Amino acid sequence: MSGIGGKVGYAARELAANADDPEWWRSRLVHRINGPVQRRFADAVRPGIDVLDADWDVFIVLDGCRADLFEEVLGVGADRGGPYDSYRRVRSRASQTGEWLRTTFPKTYGDTVYVAGNPMVSMLKPDVFHHLTESWRDGVDAELNTIAAPQVTDDALKAREQHPRKRLVVHYMQPHYPFVGFPDLHFSSFEMFHEVGVELAGDDRASSVWGALGKGLVEREAVWRGYRANLEYVLEEVERLVDGFADERVVVTSDHGNLLGERLWPVPLREYGHPPGLRTPGLIEVPWAVLTGDDRPEITTGTVQSTSTADEQDINERLAALGYV
């Protein structure tokens, strides 16, 4: 009974503290009703793509890239591949990076090298790959307030030289917020991090650009421009990267998308950003662009040697600056 009593007491305290907060109620509806209902029905009818079962040598992840944004920038679609040999939309298995990492890499992978521009990899999956390169550590650009894409490219090219017979995952931070070159769209009110002395650059009226959009502090068109510019920024590095892998089979995709005020179901609330556990199209429809290659490497399995050299505070500070709580 103590377990039940503890849960009841916790619920009572939460209700007493937040009963007058409409945002708290909205969050509870999203995560207690919309999330479970969406996962139950959407995952049963059309589960997300099995990344590891797909055919690729180099797997490029553009963090937080909606399919329609990718199509708009590159001019691709179901009947036109643009600079790629083929293109289609696929469904991701997750609506947030942490959720994607857990569902995509549930075991260990001695045939895979991971180049991580997102610190979440070091937090959740530091020891499941043949090798892990933590680009997010050396790639921090204080002026941009994010992980610079060129560092990820450089690390990926080096990783391929060192591990020519492994599958290679290259995880860029962009187009995930913060938006490069848009300081007016940087927000930083992470109270839990300020309490432990982590100071972040940006307007403190919202925790992220998505929260600012939900509060009406910024216009949707301005956010889309910043979002688009972030994708254009990282695609320059993707182009440089794939030039080095011209003979390999390369897939360019994303872990999840972002919402800009679309209504959820079954409770028709508007949502912003990329909360975990949802299966709304703007969150799980991601690009899948392929370069076929004609001289592919022979992939071999080796030992799992990956590890992270970052401590928890280092990871948390960087995640905070990138818009994670």
Image (cartoon, rainbow, N blue to C red):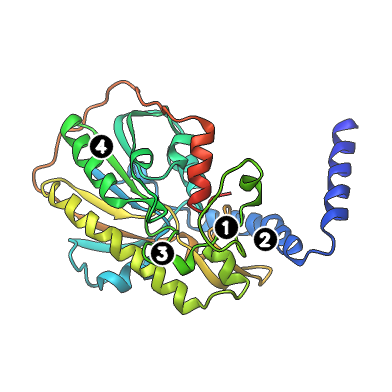
- Which quadrant holds residue 139? top left
The answer to whether residue 303 is above or below residue 38 is above
- Which quadrant holds residue 170? top left
> Mark 4 belongs to which amino acid?
Arg
Within 10 angstroms of label 2, few (less than 14), some, or many (20 or more) residues? many
Farthest left residue? 295
Q: Give the image location of residue 277, x and y in percent.
A: 58, 53
Q: Earlier along the polypeptide chain: callout 2 or callout 4?
A: 2
- Number of residue marks: 4
Helix, strand or loop under label 3: loop
Q: Give me the residue at 84% from left, 54% from top.
A: 17
Which label lies toward us, 3 or 1? Answer: 3
Q: Mark 2 = which residue? A: 30
Q: Earlier along the polypeptide chain: callout 2 or callout 1?
A: 2
> Mark 2 belongs to which amino acid?
Val
> Mark 3 belongs to which amino acid?
Arg
Q: Give the image location of residue 264, x and y in percent.
A: 61, 68
How many angstroms separate mark 3 from mark 1 (CA)? 14 Å
Q: Give me the residue at 29% from left, 45% from top.
A: 152
Q: Mark 3 = which residue? A: 66
How many angstroms separate mark 2 from mark 1 (CA)? 8 Å
Q: Mark 4 = which residue? A: 167
